[in-house]
Amino acid sequence: MSFVACVSLPPSPPLSHPKNTEKGAAFSAFSSISGRGFWPCPNAFFLRNPSHPSRGKPFLKHRPFSPIMEWQDCSTELEVDVPCSLAFDCYSDRETIPKWMPFISSVKVLEDKPDLSRWSLKYEVFGRNVEFSWLARNLQPIPNQKIHWRSLEGLPNRGAVRFFPKGPSSCRIQLTVSYEIPEILIPVASALKPFLEGLLAQGLQRFAVVAKEYQRKIPQA
């Protein structure tokens, strides 16, 4: 699949000085995306001189691919059959998150700075394996109500998990994640949000199972 953007400028009127005829050139910009449908390639700019149409071959000039980075916000929520306090405690155990969040491969809390953790993401996205990592800081939580974080290095992202009581034995969990779209995924940015929201929803469904198992292990008073 290729995306082509062309801009043609009409030839400049004849000029008295022959050296200035080059200014009547027409430019067409061509951005190609290759590699199973979405990998970005460097932008290529073609220069043609309409006053000399017989010179058929264009001059090809490569320029680095430099997209404008954008952020996306994704969210999902689910009602879980455990109390807010238990769901909060279970979600606070960051190193167990890879057990239920499908695209997180590892989380390691720093021993000397427990508010910091290193995250790794490995997943197949639209037929391609992608890997990202980042260092995150957990911000001051609100017990049984909110967990939130932001990245300090690596993949720019931030997010929050909120817990709303639905009675003595259940709660509603709302998960929101914001991230800067990686350059390699910009060509599929419009499809990336629903894709990731689907993964987040799967993660919360698995979390509900993990939380119930966690509840069963707690000694009953």
Image (spheres, grey):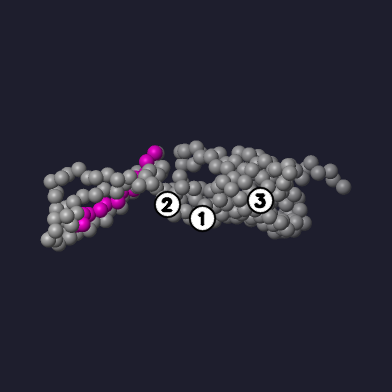
Amino acid type for the residue under numbered disc 1: Trp
Q: In 3D space, how far apart are the residues under numbered discs 2 and 1 (Cα atoms)?
A: 13 Å
Q: Nearer the viewer, mark 2 or mark 1?
A: 2
Amino acid type for the residue under numbered disc 2: Pro
What's drawn in magenta, residue-wise?
Answer: 23-35
Per the image, the residue denoted by label 1 is 71
State the mark number for residue 67: 2
Q: Is 83 one of the magenta-colored residues?
A: no
Q: Is 24 one of the magenta-colored residues?
A: yes
Percent x, y of residue 186 = 44, 49
Q: Indicate which disc, 3 or 1, sits on the residue closer to the N terminus.
A: 1
Q: Nearer the viewer, mark 3 or mark 1?
A: 3
Q: Quadrant of residue 142?
A: bottom right
Q: Quadrant of the N terminus?
A: top left
Percent x, y of residue 22 = 19, 54
For disc 1, the neighbor class at 10 Å (few under 14, some 14 to 19, many from 20) is few
Give the overall secondary structure of the magenta segment: strand
Q: In 3D space, how far apart are the residues under numbered discs 3 and 1 (Cα atoms)?
A: 19 Å
Percent x, y of residue 55 = 15, 45
Per the image, the residue denoted by label 3 is 137
Secondary element type, mark 1: strand
Residue 2 can be seen, yes or no? no
Q: Nearer the viewer, residue 53 or 108?
A: 53
